[in-house]
Amino acid sequence: MTVTEPSTRFLAQAPHGFSNVVEVSGGRLVFITGQMALDAAGSLVGPGDFEAQFEQAFRNIESQLAVVGATFDNVVKISVLAEEGFVESAHKFGEVRDRFVNTTNPPASAIVLTPRLVHPGALVDISAIAHLTE
């Protein structure tokens, strides 16, 4: 993965925790569908607790990456759907994310707020795209 930093003349400030541009070539792309804070038994982890749900969703992504021989170092894009209370927990999201992603070359990132997710009690749904050079 190559992180390409565009000219900052169009940006008010440099991004923190994500990259504006990530370029990939060759290899293969792996798309991981949105992961909620469900444990191996399908039970919701951390009802009402954004931080606990961030942690579980990232662990779920990590386990899906392992299935295809990848790690978070291969992740080039993260997309987050979160219930509206996310804004108050955004700093916790950054802390949890940074324990998983490659902070030297962070993935591109998007966060979309939604009034409600499909699974009752779920506060966050995180998907990822990974690039493997093999």
Image: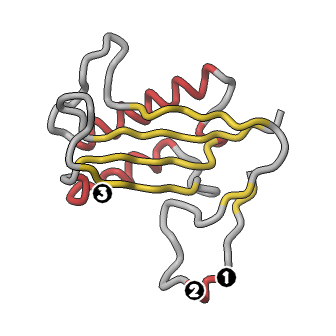
Q: Position of residue 59 (x, y in %)?
A: 44, 30
Displayed quadrant of residue 88: bottom left
Residue at the far left: name it. 48
Residue placed under numbered mark 3 in the picture: 90
The type of residue carrying mark 3 is Ala
Task: Please name the amino acid that badge 2 sits on.
Answer: Phe
Q: How many marks?
A: 3
Q: Which of 3 and 114 is in front in this view?
A: 114
Q: Residues within 10 Å of mark 2 (few under 14, many from 20)?
A: few
Q: Where is residue 77 in the image (x, y as percent from the top left)?
A: 57, 49
- Report which quarter residue 27 is drawn in: top right
Q: Which residue appears farthest toward the top when viewing the image?
A: 41
Q: Which residue lies at the image location 32% right of the left edge and 10% below the top edge?
A: 41
Q: Which colour scheme is used?
A: secondary structure
Gap in angstroms between the C-alphas marked 3 and 2: 24 Å
Residue contact between numbered discs 1 and 2, judged by CB atoms under 8 Å: yes
* Image point (54%, 24%), residue name: 64
Q: Distance between the residues labelled 1 and 2?
A: 7 Å
In the picture of the structure, the residue carrying the numbered disc 1 is 7
Q: What element carries label 3?
A: helix
78 is higher (above) or lower (below) than 11: above
In the picture provided, is 29 more to the left or to the right than 81?
A: right
Mark 2 lies on residue = 10
Disc 1 marks a residue whose amino acid type is Ser
Q: Residue at x 27, y 50 (%)?
A: 114
Q: What x and y, as percent, mark residue 56? A: 35, 31
| N-terminal label among 1 and 3 | 1
Residue 51, position as x, y percentages in the image: 27, 43
Residue 120's image quarter? top left
